[in-house]
Image (spheres, rainbow, N blue to C red):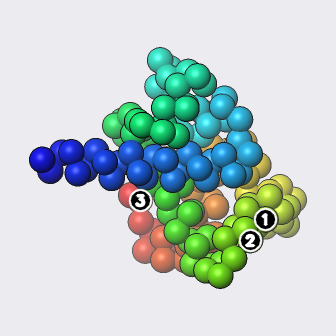
């Protein structure tokens, strides 16, 4: 029974991550790459993650999953009254990121990009050197 609850929670979190990746206007190939999904997962499988399936339980996927959740949480803290500002912030170029948008940093730098954006947004992650 505990597994069912955990699976249901993982599906809901996967759906939230997919919703966010879609809001960031990432295409299927970018999502596969950023999330380090296994080679047998194809773009056509992404719709299952939006509706019914949890992400595969691999160390690579889990690490990226945690960073995206951390970014989502940090953006919600930064913009508690206007969630649309999170999307705006992610799409706005910044000198801190060499005149790239946070989305470009993530797409181009993959895991390192996720970490960079999370550290920028979440001072507690950077402060404690958390390596979830």
* Foreground: disc 3 or disc 1: 1
- Which image quadrant for residue 27? top right
Q: Are marks 1 and 2 in contact (CB under 8 Å)?
A: yes
SS for tag 3?
loop
Give the numbered dot on residue 131: 3
Contact, mark 2 vs mark 3 (Cβ under 8 Å) = no
Which class describes the residues within 10 Å of circle 1: few (<14), some (14-19), or many (20+)?
Answer: few
Asked if residue 65 lies left or right of residue 87, the reply is left
Q: Residue at x 60, y 25 (%)?
A: 43
- How many angstroms separate mark 3 from mark 1 (CA)? 27 Å
Q: Tell me if residue 80 comes above or below residue 55 in the rendering.
A: below
From the image, tell me which residue sits under label 1.
88
Residue at numbered disc 2: 85
- Give the mark toward the camera: 2 or 3: 2
Q: Is residue 81 above or below residue 45?
A: below
On the image, the x and y values in percent for residue 98 come to: 83, 59
For the point 45% across and 46% down, the residue is: 14
Q: Secondary structure at mark 2?
A: helix
């Amino acid at each position: 029974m505990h597994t069912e609850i955990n699976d249901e929670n993982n599906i809901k979190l996967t759906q939230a991550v997919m919703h966010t990746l879609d809001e960031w206007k990432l295409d299927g190939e970018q999502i596969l790459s950023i999330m380090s999904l296994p080679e047998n997962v194809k773009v056509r499988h992404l719709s299952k993650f939006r509706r019914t399936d949890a992400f595969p339980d691999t160390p690579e996927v889990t690490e990226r999953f945690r960073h995206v959740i951390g970014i989502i949480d940090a953006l919600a803290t930064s913009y508690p009254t206007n969630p649309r500002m999170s999307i705006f912030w992610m799409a706005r170029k910044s000198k801190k990121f060499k005149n790239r948008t946070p989305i470009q940093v993530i797409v181009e730098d993959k895991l390192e990009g996720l970490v960079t954006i999370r550290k920028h947004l979440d001072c507690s992650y950077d402060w404690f050197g958390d390596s979830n």
